[in-house]
Amino acid sequence: MRATHTQTMKLRMVVAGILLVIPLVVFLDIPSYNRETPELAGLPFFYWWQILWLALSAGLFVVAAILIDWNGQREA
Amino acid sequence: MWDSVSWVVFLTLFAVFSALGFLGVLWRRGDMRTLQEWALAGRRLGTWLMFFLVGADLYTAYTFIAVPSSMFATGDIFFYAVPYVAITFSIALLAMPRIWRISREKGYITASDLIRDRFNSRSLAILVAIVGIVAELPYIALQIVGMQAVLVAMLQGVSDYTTVSEVALIVAFLILAAFTWTSGLRGATLTAVLKDALIFVTVIAVIVAVATAGDVGRAFTLEPKYVTLPPTLENAYWSLFVMSALALYLYPHAINGIQGATDVKTLRRSTALLPLYGVGLAGLALFGVFIYAVPNALKYVHSFPATSQGTQVVPGLILFTLPDWFAGIAFLGIFIGGLVPATIMAMSQANLLTRNIIKEARPLTPHGETQLAKWASVVFKFLALGFVFAVPSTYAIQLQLFGGILILQILPSLFFGLFRYRLDKYSLMVGLLAGVASGLYLMEYANKFSIWKTTLYTTPFGLLYIGVTALSINVAIVLVGSLVAWAVTRRTPAPGSEPVAG
């Protein structure tokens, strides 16, 4: 019982870690989004792609925060 | 346009804002004569207030004035601000709850408190405090530039440009000093809510107005250089956003700000939501491009000297796309958007000075400490004024980037201080000093020892942000020095020395 608890805790932290790193990886690959097309409402790809990922980052971070907090509650 | 209706709206809202600032003193009343209450709001803020307060640290004149200005004057490399606000919060989510927990347990308020204990070194803590205080100065200067830009837009036509900009600067400065003195963090938090509400409304309204007034796509046809980032600047782009992301939470005001959270969960939730602020920031950054599609606003901006015209991009768009009463709301939003963050920054400087520098020399009573902190925050604002003159206001973003170069140098001491293995304190000090010195030198070198317009310089990898190089030098010294120190002490363990593991 205790072993599985520690295991899920570890798994949660790893998943949370991955969620936190995804936006960094996406934004660091500049050549992948440094282009004009496809445009969205007149905005070149370069702009709307990054704005889209801003919103997605918030989503990923909230999930990561919830995963970490579950763990914190069990611990306490 | 700006007319008497705009004035009435602006002044009425400013009265509401001031009232909130003063009411902050009464809100969840505490003894304002203690530093804990004046500067940390008694550590009792929940998720939403934390969201607004820390959001206030981010959504500053940097966002409203400096980013659009540099997009307009230089180019789309300054869109780096968008990935910057996206990833800075992943770093914050990893490091800040830890700092919060240790601080609550041991009663720390500043990074220097933590570092002093962790490395058992007063000198290192004082060095870190000094770097923190100095790094805030250009950032405060940027806020003053933002407030000045709004006042200039309001007063244009009253007199010639030079007089107007000088009067604007003095008024901005006096209001800032008076506001910090009276309200403390409680006032700043309450007013941050008002500020953010006004700003959100403004950003949405201008986006809608610009989209209807001028075809957004046309701006990119008129100015094709904005369509994509020149490939030669890709390295500069990541170096700017990665380093800015690392720097944000090292600033004393950010560390100060998170201490107000009521618990770790609150801190994490509010931090995770913060990238949402960035969507507004992205809109504002794009105003630097959109303005090319709004001829009236463009003509207005070009009526100012090149050294300051960039700061008029957002005010100009507001004046020429929104009704007069709305301009009053928007201008107040931008004005207090500089005022509130500058207040928070000045308070964190004062904290550092009293707790980590003066108290090391002579003991202070709690009330004496607060009194001194208040006076110090006024003096620091005068020093910040010096930076206002160091950078042409169109390039005001360089103030924030310069502060970034400095504050990055405390990264090894603070972040590595959270880990289990202790680094050598002397190496940390040498690394920090070398980082600051190399950063300053490269800054002067990149600007040909003249007025500051850039924080990028040419390397074998193309243009790079100076912060990368300065931090690399710092970290290299810390790691090599610590390894050497570790090897030496292992061979000859001093009697009674403590083990490496912390």
Image (spheres, rainbow, N blue to C red):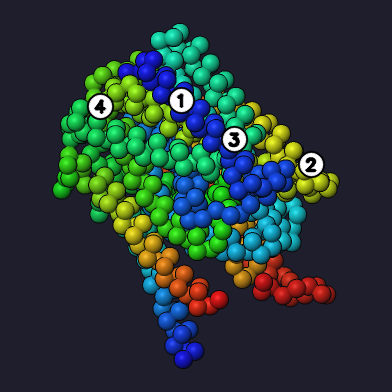
Residue at the far bottom: name it. A1
Instruction: Give the camera-side residue of B94 and B46.
Output: B46
User: Do tags 2 and 3 sit on the same chain?
Assistant: yes
Question: Does B466 sit left or right of B440 as displayed?
Answer: left
> Callout 4 environment at 10 Å: few (<14), some (14 to 19), or many (20+)?
many
Asked if the residue under mark 3 is in contact with the one under mark 2, i.e. CB atoms within 8 Å, the reply is no
Residue B152 position within the rendered picture, expressed as x and y whole percent measured from the top left:
45, 19
Chain letter for mark 1: B
Residue labelled with disc 3: B22
> Callout 2 environment at 10 Å: few (<14), some (14 to 19), or many (20+)?
some
Residue B236 position within the rendered picture, expressed as x and y whole percent measured from the top left:
39, 45
> Which comes sooner in the sequence, label 4 or label 1?
1
Chain letter for mark 4: B
Residue labelled with disc 2: B368
Three-letter amino acid code of the residue under disc 3? Phe
> Which comes sooner in the sequence, label 2 or label 3?
3
> Which comes sooner in the sequence, label 3 or label 1?
1
Residue labelled with disc 4: B292
The reply to whether residue B237 is visible in this rendering is: no
Seen in the picture, residue B394 relative to A18 is either above or below; the reply is: above
Q: Quadrant of the N terminus of chain B?
A: top left
Residue at the image position 53 percent from the left and 36 percent from the top: B20
Residue labelled with disc 1: B12
Residue B446 position within the rendered picture, expressed as x and y whole percent measured from the top left:
48, 35
Q: CA distance from mark 4 to mark 1?
A: 33 Å
